[in-house]
Amino acid sequence: MTRIHGFLTRCTALAAVICLVCACSTTRRLEEGEVLYTGVKKVDYVPDTASHLSNDLKDDIYDDVFVAPNNYLKLLNWHYPFPLGLWVYNNWPNPEKGFRHWLYEKLVDEPVLVSDVRPDARVKMVEQTLQNNGYFRGKSTFSLVPSKRNSRKASIQYNVFPGTPFRFGQFQLLPDTANVNSLINNIAERDSYLRAGQCYNVDSLSAARIRITNELRTRGYYYFSPDLIEYLADTVAVPGEVQMRMILAAGTPEDVLDPYRTGRVTVYVDRPNHKSRQPLDTIVTDRATIIRQMPTRLRKGTISDNVRFRPGKIFSVRDMDRTQAYLSRLGIFSSVNINPVPDSTAAGRVLDVDVYCTLDKPLEASIEVNASSKSNSYLGPGLSLGLTNRNIFGGGEQLSFKLTGTYEWQTGHNRNSVFNSYEVIFSTTLSFPRLLAPKFIPRRRRQINWTRFNINADLLNRPHYFKMAQFNLGMSYDWQAHRHVNMSFTPLKLTYTKLMNTTHDFDSIMVANPAVALSFQSQFIPQMQYSYSYDRQFGRNNRLSYSFMVQEAGNVFWSIYELCGKHGEKKLFGTPFAQFVKGQMQLVYSYRTGPGDTWLVTRAAVGAAHAYGNSSQVPYAEQFYCGGANSVRAFTVRSIGPGSYRPPHHTSSDYFDQTGTFRFEANAELRFPIAGPVHGAVFLDAGNVWLLKDDPSRPGGKLKASSFLKDLALGTGVGLRVDISMLVLRGDLGIGIHAPYDTGKKGYYNMTSFGKSLAFHLAIGYPF
């Protein structure tokens, strides 16, 4: 009772202090005639003339008038009601030195006055913004809105009268008196903005100049710049229209208006920390002369294959940018610099090209301490040791070794149990920065294409259940077939899984679930896999991402055995191999719902796997599961499905048998900025997994059209994200609405209690 009384006393005292601070005058020290500024009351647009104003223009106008008042917390965009800094300024003396002086300087907040804001100057800024956007008759005024409690405090209301925007009437291009004029006119005629009917906009006109300049620089006019194009505007000839005329700036040098051709191309390759007396080696190719310091491990074609210039052809900035990108992406140079130099001895306009490359140190060792977040809601610290040779054969080939150890635990408030685990992975990869494949496979030169060979060993320990080892080797191709399309093909991936140790609890679970036991058996998995992904942004407000993956296992080996007359169960090195097909597809559509960075992101995902022939069950690692940080977030991983099945409460087998061979998920998430890198989200998730084959030990698990909608788990929730570009740290609180299994409650909302329907997930990266 004494503790409670003391707590109440402190709360009462704190409330009294807050009331005292709020009650004390914050305007006592203002000079005569000064008014304390309390913020922007409103920006009022005249309705009949402002309905066509874009949200971006309204944002620009608000930026013109906004000044932060006292008690404003920029991080949360909040004008809080406790003016502590003003109270200190008005009521606390400021000693010349000592602790009280230091504290005063830390707490004090000098008043922001209306005279400091200068609203008369801000309405002129608004009018200038309107004019820059074509509202030449636009006007703006302001008025003070005094506080009802204190006449010496006031907010400011701004009134905007934009009027009707001026549009282009006649748009006159350059006179056809020179080749460069004709070229500029051709480019301008294809520009979607430089035509009659468009609203006058200073930024859009500047952007058009930049587009014209960029295209000219790709056609040999290397020294042309945007400021050489000028516009003359006449708003008097035709009321409400702007008659535009394009001209070249006076005094433009003649050499700027002539195209250049490419002369000699020389590539200088320096070793890191080189000495000037080291010997040089010269290699002459049809694209460039390569001068390199020796000793240097560098294949002859490594440089020339990535130089896009062609001596004698029109000089293009695009070729310069591509050469820079192609050489940099090899990963063997610490710096690449390109310097075009006019050749005064050549006939006509010629640019010689000098390319300076400095080799990076080939060996790179790394030690990483990190936190990992997996799609199955496992989170934990990890340590990785890596060693990479980035130029092992002299052509940008990379040989890497990596040893990783992680300790993980499962997130989610309503999980049935906690499974802490550790995993040790050793991997080695040999990567070639090109496709070692037939030339007829379509690929883009602008992006690097990879051929990879890898060998991995993985030891996974789930305490109290099992220890599993997995080994795999394979090769894969990764390439970009189109600007928005990436593809990957794995012609061979051979995986061997083996249960090394199991516990009595795990064995009893397997005995009760024969189908699950078969999916855990030691076996080879010879696979072939193809994946396709399409990602494109349409304008500023729409983005579409589509991907699918199809894989098969065991069919090639099974066919070979059948042709050789081997029937029945087939084995590889004395161990059965899996045979199945599996496909997955995902569609993500994002729509910007308004000004700023607010997006509505929707996702639909479906997948199916089927075992046959040499296997009766799909391997456990290849089956689908639902729930977790990247799925239905109101439920922890593998806590729902398959279908309406739910394990008996007295067992802990749910971690193992709540998987399926068919999955469907649908998500909708509204993402919005809060302050700086902090973003918020509101989401709605639905999904589940089912069995394509009936399993008597898991009743209700088979996929049926009649119960499909009822079997969908549904949840909602809110989330916070810290997005610092290279890393996104995410926390999501899911709230269950409907569980697909029998909870003992009737109706669609069948959660036993609100508290038990919550699940919190901490993860890295966005869920989709």
Image (spheres, grey):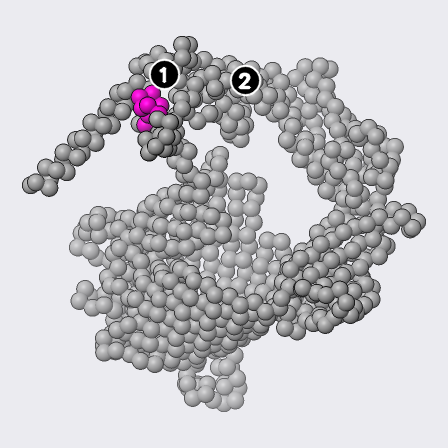
Quarter of the figure with residue 710: bottom left
The magenta segment: 84-94
Identify which residue, 16 or 623, lies in the foreground: 16
Which residue is rendered at x = 46% and y = 56% of the image? 586
Residue 46 point in image, percent of width and height? 49, 17
Q: What residue is shown at x 65% (from left), y 32% (from top)?
A: 204
| Amino acid of disc 1 | Arg
- Pinpoint residue 184: horizontal percent, then vertical percent: 78, 36
Q: Is residue 354 above or below residue 274?
A: above
Q: Which mark is residue 48?
A: none
Q: What residue is disc 1 on?
A: 29
Report crowding for label 1: few under 14, some 14 to 19, many 20 or more residues within 10 A (C-alpha).
few
> Which residue has dot 2 on it?
121
Q: Is residue 105 above or below residue 396?
A: above
The Cα atoms of the two marked residues, 2 and 1, are separated by: 26 Å
Q: Farthest top residue?
A: 32
Label 2 element class: helix
**Residue in the foreground of this view, choosing between 487 and 213:** 213
Q: Is residue 241 left or right of residue 606?
A: right
Q: Does the image show residue 476? A: no
The answer to whether residue 271 of the structure is visible from this angle is yes
Q: Is residue 495 left or right of residue 323?
A: left
| Sequence-first disc among 2 and 1 | 1
- 485 in relation to 435, above or below: above
Disc 2 marks a residue whose amino acid type is: Ala
Q: Nearer the viewer, residue 616 or 293?
A: 293
* Depth order, front residue of 120/304: 120
